[in-house]
Image: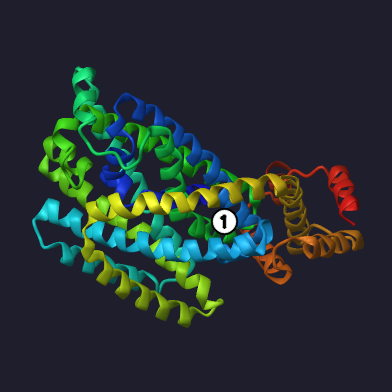
Amino acid sequence: MKVYWKIAFAYIGIIIGAGLSSGQDLLQYFLSFGKEGLIGVVLLGLLNIIFGWIMVTLGCYYRADNHEQVFSQITHPVITRILDIVLVVGNFVMGFVMIAGAGSNLRQQFSISPWIGSLLCSALVILVAFLDFDKITGVLGIFTPIMIAMILLLTAYTFIGKSYDFTMLEQAARTIKPAMGNVWISVINYYALCAMTGVSMAFILGGSMVRIGNAEKGGFLGGLLIGIIVLAASFSLFANINLVKNSDMPMLAIVNQIHPALALVYALTIFALIFNTAFSLYYSIARRFSAGDKRKMRMLMVAITVAGFICSFGGFKQLISFMYPILGYMGMLLLAVLLIGWLKEHQNIIFEKFARRKMLRISIKKQHPEMKVTKKDRELYDELSEISPADTADLKTDISKMAKKIVANVDDSKAFVKKELPVDDDKLHESLDKKK
């Protein structure tokens, strides 16, 4: 449970960046259409659940180190090349939009020059790049629970004991210039943009896991919580539309009405989430071109972040209204590829889930002094690792490490295997025979 919640919180931290946590995206893409926009937000939540699950699962299935490793397996080489270019360019663009958002956030709350906030965010991105990956995952998810609690508190404050004239609110909302022509295009375009933001790092998060079941749960929970967050935030913004419609950081403007101390906490939380997204975008680019070389990856992080800081001077609100719709259209191809790829590999993913469970069961036997491993077990272990889409040596190493931890930390390994790692051996062998 700890593993998939950690992945869920990290995934939320990646997706909930400057636009969603500030409320600016929700205003331009959804609330500008009035009540119809709230229906669009519900559909946005459903897309987050579906594709959060798909992205993290595919990353785990292929044990991905970067997005190119997944796309090269699920689509045509030409489309892989197009998506690779789109994601690298898109991630860089969205990265410097996040950096600009960090400056805008601190300017609104603390009245300091925007470049100072942008510089601070850039410096933190570079510093965290020098941590190991497990610590990075922890950092990405650390502020997510705080942000969820803050938005739920804000929603409760907005609606408990209060009533609103929704006809007047809708009229006020429709004075906001929409990012897209209609709300239904907004839903697809904006979620495509979210997928562009999150897919590379979602693959990497999934790739850091061995058990596909945990990856599925992490992606599903992350998407579900994002859906809840954006729905709660949207209703709060809609109820306070006259207050927030001209604000760079609409959610922060509402929190300021509750209490200045709470606004301080929320401003710092937004800053942390902006940092999460900026870091994830730049980190995925650096991982793509470093070929597993940590030193090269860190040098690339420094260069990319400095370039992003320079580009961030275009202004946060202006960058969102101009760049996001363009990137959203580019992301629609990505969504199609992800959905087709997952449907194509669905049965293989199910097989691989149980194959890795079986490998882990055999590895626990190897590590446990009271369990015996048969010759058939060893042959099956090698056969399953060889046909896996993941790198054979890495998969064996990681399963062995996981087995050692289980044996060392679980009082009754046999009971654990029976409860947590169920496998239908007959079906597994039947599927294995079909693959030969």
Badge 1 marks a residue whose secondary structure is helix
Q: Is residue 270 above or below residue 122?
A: above
Q: Is residue 143 left or right of residue 165?
A: right
Residue drawn at x 18%, y 28% is 172
- Disc 1: CA contacts within 10 A as few (<14), some (14-19) or many (>=20): many
The amino acid on which the numbered mark 1 sits, given as a three-letter code, is Gly
Where is residue 171? Give x, y as percent.
21, 24
Q: Quadrant of residue 26?
A: top left
Numbered marks: total: 1
Where is residue 248? Give x, y as percent.
19, 47
Q: Is residue 208 above or below residue 307?
A: above
Question: Which quarter of the figure is the N terminus placed in?
Answer: top right
Q: Quadrant of residue 304?
A: bottom left
Q: In the image as oriented, which residue stretches furthest toward the front?
A: 181
Where is residue 301? Give x, y as percent.
39, 74
Q: Is residue 93 above or below residue 431?
A: below
Residue drawn at x 34%, y 41% is 148
Question: Which quarter of the figure is the C terminus placed in?
Answer: bottom right
Does residue 64 show up?
Answer: no
Of 36 and 364, nearer the camera is 36
**Residue annotated with mark 1:** 206
Residue drawn at x 23%, y 53% is 318
Colouring style? rainbow
Residue drawn at x 31%, y 44% is 25
Does residue 269 show up?
Answer: yes
Where is residue 232? Give x, y as percent.
33, 32
